[in-house]
Amino acid sequence: MESTTKVDDEQWLAYWIIYSFITLFEMAAENVLYWIPLWYEAKLLLVAWLVLPQFRGASFIYDKFVREQLRKNGVRLQDNHGHGHGHAADHVPHIFQAEHHAVH
């Protein structure tokens, strides 16, 4: 939040979105995952890949999969990258800004 660039803010936002989906999946498939050997070790490696800045896994998954699904379902994402007009919305990472188009 206090950084000069929005890249790390976007990475963290993408991480928490994806981690939420992992947690929901894990809750839904708890009985099955219990029987999968090394599930928790695999999850640890996945979470490390998502969060470590050397890999930027959360941004990769968001850009390749989540963003495409949002676009496919009619959500328009904005890319501001610091070209704002001083409005509060200009300081929200582009992956958090979306406009829904109503059908007239």
Image (cartoon, rainbow, N blue to C red):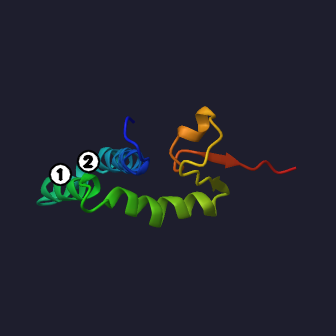
Badge number at residue 8: none
Where residue 36 sits in the image (x, y, percent)? 16, 60
Judged from the image, the secondary structure of the residue bearing numbered disc 2 is helix
Relative side of 90 to 21, left or right = right
Looking at the picture, does residue 78 appear above or below residue 86? Answer: below
Viewer-nearest residue: 85 or 42: 85
Residue type of the residue flagged with mark 2: Glu
Where residue 33 sits in the image (x, y, percent)? 22, 54
Where residue 94 sits in the image (x, y, percent)? 54, 49
Judged from the image, the secondary structure of the residue bearing numbered disc 1 is loop
Viewer-nearest residue: 32 or 15: 15
Q: Which residue is mark 2?
A: 30
Relative side of 68 to 30, left or right = right
Residue at 52 percent across and 60 percent down: it is 67
Q: CB atoms at circles 1 and 2 under 8 Å apart?
A: yes
Q: Which residue is mark 1?
A: 34
Relative side of 70 to 48, left or right = right
Where residue 81 sits in the image (x, y, percent)? 53, 52
Viewer-nearest residue: 39 or 82: 82
